Amino acid sequence: SQTIHQWPATLVQPVGSPLSLECTVEGTSNPNLYWYRQAAGRGLQLLFYSVGIGQISSEVPQNLSASRPQDRQFILSSKKLLLSDSGFYLCAWSGGRQLETQYFGPGTRLLVL
Amino acid sequence: DQQVKQNSPSLSVQEGRISILNCDYTNSMFDYFLWYKKYPAEGPTFLISISSIKDKNEDGRFTVFLNKSAKHLSLHIVPSQPGDSAVYFCAASALPGSNYKLTFGKGTLLTVNP
């Protein structure tokens, strides 16, 4: 069966510091991968998606970037965090016979102070 | 422009009764719809989906209804249980060619009272 991991679970970072969040998927190959952010009281906003290694599409101009160095690894980064980057970050994957259904990881709560 | 709308931020239901969660969309290109359930500080869990070629899909206590002409879908939970208390997100996708991106509503908090 497929599983998706995210770490860390919680992160508190000062403004201006760098960020690296990691997501890995097991049990599938060549998945589509997605990064979402959920701000307080809001829905899920798609930030980036990737259909293959090195292929990244950005949905929202922002202070963040994403990379996919390996087939089942997706990384969300920032060089300098802003207060507005605080939120709950979710990684998701889809693949196999059900590309239209996304499955989410446990999420990372980021607090920028 | 919010393409997927969940106009009720919250809903309270008695245990054993029916919960009806509603979702409206504006993009006529959407042809695949999903419902997710989310507990606090956890990732959303996929519940049920429906393709635009159908008007109903059922899975146990969960049934999703789609009214394409009204651009409206609903999730029925019968009977409701206290463990169903969570935020429910409606999502939509325009297939094919969208890279399977999902557009989410803002969610509805369901509380099932014992």
Image: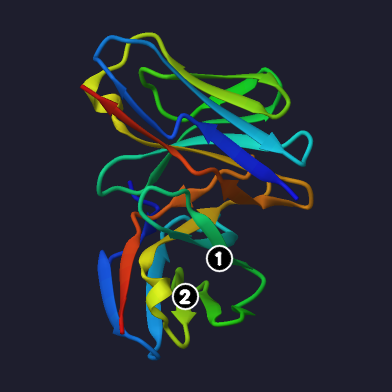
Judge the density around disc 2: few (<14), some (14-19), many (≥20) Cα neighbours within 10 Å: many
* SS label for mark 2: strand
Q: Residue at x 31, y 84 (%)?
A: B114
Dots 2 and 1 on the same chain: yes
Point 58% across, 37% down: residue: A5
Residue B59 horizontal/vertical position (percent): 62, 78
Position above or below: B61 against B44: below
Task: Give me the C-alpha separation between circle 2 and circle 1.
Answer: 10 Å
Task: Judge from the rendering whether residue A29 lies leftward or rightward of residue B29; answer left or right.
Answer: right
Residue linked to disc 1: B47
Q: Is residue B68 visible?
A: yes
In the rendered image, is residue B98 in sight? no
Say what amino acid the circle numbered 2 marks: Leu
- Chain of the residue that carries numbered disc 2 in the rendered image: B
Q: Which residue is mark 2?
A: B75
Labels 2 and 1 touching (C-beta < 8 A): yes
Q: Residue at x 42, y 81 (%)?
A: B81
Residue nearer the viewer, B71 or B108: B108
> From the viewer's perspective, is residue A76 above or below residue B61?
above
Q: Nearer the viewer, mark 2 or mark 1?
A: 1
Query: Residue A109: x and y, percent?
Result: 36, 35
Q: Position of residue A19 (x, y in %)?
A: 41, 16
Q: How many marks?
A: 2
Q: Residues within 10 Å of mark 1 (few under 14, many from 20)?
A: some
Q: Secondary structure at mark 1?
A: strand
Name the spot of residue A83 as percent of width and height, x first.
22, 22
